[in-house]
Image (spheres, grey):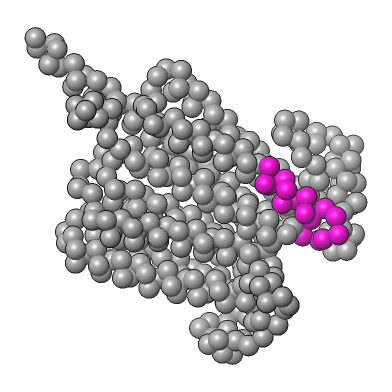
Amino acid sequence: MASVEAAPLVARDRELANRAMIRGWLYVVLFFLFAIVLVGGATRLTESGLSITEWKPIHGIIPPLSDAEWQEEFLKYQQIPQYQILNQDMTLDGFKTIFWWEWAHRVLARGVGFIFAVPLLYFWFSRRIEPGLGPKLVGILALGGLQGAVGWWMVASGLVERTEVSQYRLATHLTIAALIFTATMVVARGLAQHHAAPADRVTQKFAGWIVVLVLFQIFLGGLVAGLDAGLTYNTWPLMDGAVIPGDMLIMQPVWHNFFENPKTVQFIHRGGAYLLLALTLWHMIATHRRQPGTTHGRRALILFHLVLLQAIIGVVTLLMQVDIHWALLHQGFALVTLGFAAAHWRATKGSYPLPTEIAVRS
């Protein structure tokens, strides 16, 4: 009789252990995703993204191993507009520098695919993945596969006619990376045991919209990077000598300004930062009023300060005319802010119910 009564407890302990193992694996994945985005940012800032002109998902993991192979890669690079228009004075050593940045970015991307797929298969066949979790994990893996194709689609835009990649495709590539990071964080935090009661629906929805706005800011940051918009109008708080600068709608049709006019794109990115800061401030105050002394309120407080710090880093990056160290800090901290916002939103909803808990309820 005692063993029958203990069976649910044993099953619950096993489910919690499986969740802890899967959650730890997802945190490792998050670390590598963070590294990929940072290396991708450095690749963009050093204008290295077009140094490898072919997409070889398998063979491409092997870099040039001889002088002849390096010369062959360099010759391929010399055929594209970026070299012919901007870098005709580049030496082989200079080419090696930009090659290694792009190669590292691609190898990290392939590596995280293995880090995700191989443990996923192990957890699947060892029956450690509970019902409902499998589709979420497979969806993240599929999104990662799509990201690889989008990455090449982005690079291909700079191999003919253009000297750099399309800002549309760069922003898309960065946003999908942020989506993968967000989804991984949400699933990982959903597997944690949240002892606090779920927040009220208003708080949950507000926290969710903050995540959406952070993602939109990252998309805008991709457009800013793609247009090199951060290299102009390097003043703050005024922009081009005014609170609202002129000539922001000079392109025709008008909608082009929101994606192709560096001044307009930078202005919208600034405005998005102010809006995000105001919303997180309101969220912090409102959450403390509704649920004082709770972990939800404490996380809202931290989130506001993360957004504030990110805004300060953004201003310094602008004033420093996109110094590479500040720019990478700005990009990396954007992911930190996004990750915390996603974790905060997921925590407001409480934990996923354990299979044994669902069985008891039914």
Q: Quadrant of the C terminus?
A: top left
Answer above or below: position of 11 versus 185: above
Answer above or below: position of 310 versus 6: below
Q: Residue at x 40, y 19 (%)?
A: 127
Which quadrant of the view contains residue 110?
Answer: top right
Question: Residue 205 location in percent, x, y?
Answer: 33, 58
Residue placed farthest to the bottom in the image?
241
Residue 166: tell me if it is visible.
yes
Q: Does the magenta segment cover residue 91?
A: no
Question: Residue 100 location in percent, x, y?
Answer: 72, 45
Question: Residue 180 location in percent, x, y?
Answer: 52, 45
Which quadrant of the view contains residue 228?
Answer: bottom right
**Over which residues does the magenta segment extend?**
149-164
Q: Residue at x 9, y 12 (%)?
A: 2
Q: Quadrant of the N terminus?
A: top left
Image position of 210 (left or right of 316): left
Image position of 355 (left or right of 271): left
Q: Residue at x 37, y 69 (%)?
A: 279
Q: Residue at x 53, y 41 (%)?
A: 32
Image position of 340 (left or right of 2): right
Question: Residue 260 location in percent, x, y?
Answer: 69, 70
Which quadrant of the view contains residue 274?
Answer: bottom left
Residue placed farthest to the front in the image?
362
